[in-house]
Amino acid sequence: MALISWSNMLSTGIGEQDTQHKKLIDLINQLNDAMQSGHANDVLGKILSELVNYTVFHFGYEEKLMAQYKYEDTPAHKAEHAKFVQTAGDLKKKFDSGNAVISVEIMNFLRDWLTNHIMKTDKKMGQAFVKLGAK
Ligand SMILES: [Fe+2]
Ligand SMILES: [Fe+2]
């Protein structure tokens, strides 16, 4: 079963942002499935790398939009992104050096972080930009 399921409650109102969130959810679900079926570390590592890289790409996309719309909450939103990139990067480093495993706790952290960030921070941004004409 998927760890995270997409629902309209997660929609920010901006099509491209939703598409990218669906991809992030898909990668987290893939990582969870791979962990649960006991796949080898090289399989998990590949998905984890993809997740970290796609997260950086996605945050860049949102931060470009924030600059474009001169968004007032940019500093707080960017700070949430930076903290997560740091945490995910540390996890990847520890995993790559054999000092961390992908656990249920880590998967729950990824699920909770992403869904909370989308529901609160990204939705607030998306709804503000929809009012300014974003789609
Ligand atoms: Fe996002
Ligand atoms: Fe965000």
Image: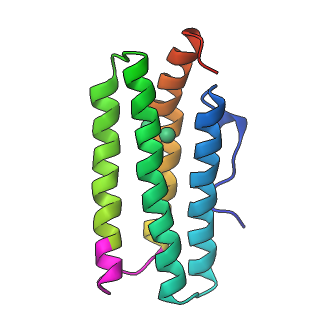
Label tally: 0
> Which of the pair 95/134 is nearer the observer?
134
In the rendering, at what x and y percent does residue 113 appear?
A: 44, 50
**Which residue occupies 48% across, 52% down?**
112
For the question of whether residue 23 can be seen, the reply is yes
Quadrant (top left, top right, bottom left, bottom right) of the C terminus: top right
In the rendering, at what x and y percent does residue 90 appear?
A: 28, 66
**Secondary structure mainly formed by the magenta segment:** loop
Most extreme residue toward the top is 132
Q: Quadrant of residue 81?
A: top left
**Which residue occupies 43% across, 60% down?**
52
**Which residue occupies 47% across, 69% down?**
48
Residue 66 is a magenta residue: no
Asked if residue 24 is positioned above or below residue 80 in the image, the reply reads below
Question: What residue span does the magenta drawing correspond to?
Answer: 93-103
| Colour basis | rainbow
- Please indicate whether residue 46 sits to the left or right of residue 92 in the image: right
**Which residue occupies 27% across, 38% down?**
79
Asked if residue 115 is positioned above or below residue 2 in the image, the reply reads above
In the rendering, at what x and y percent does residue 111 appear?
A: 52, 56
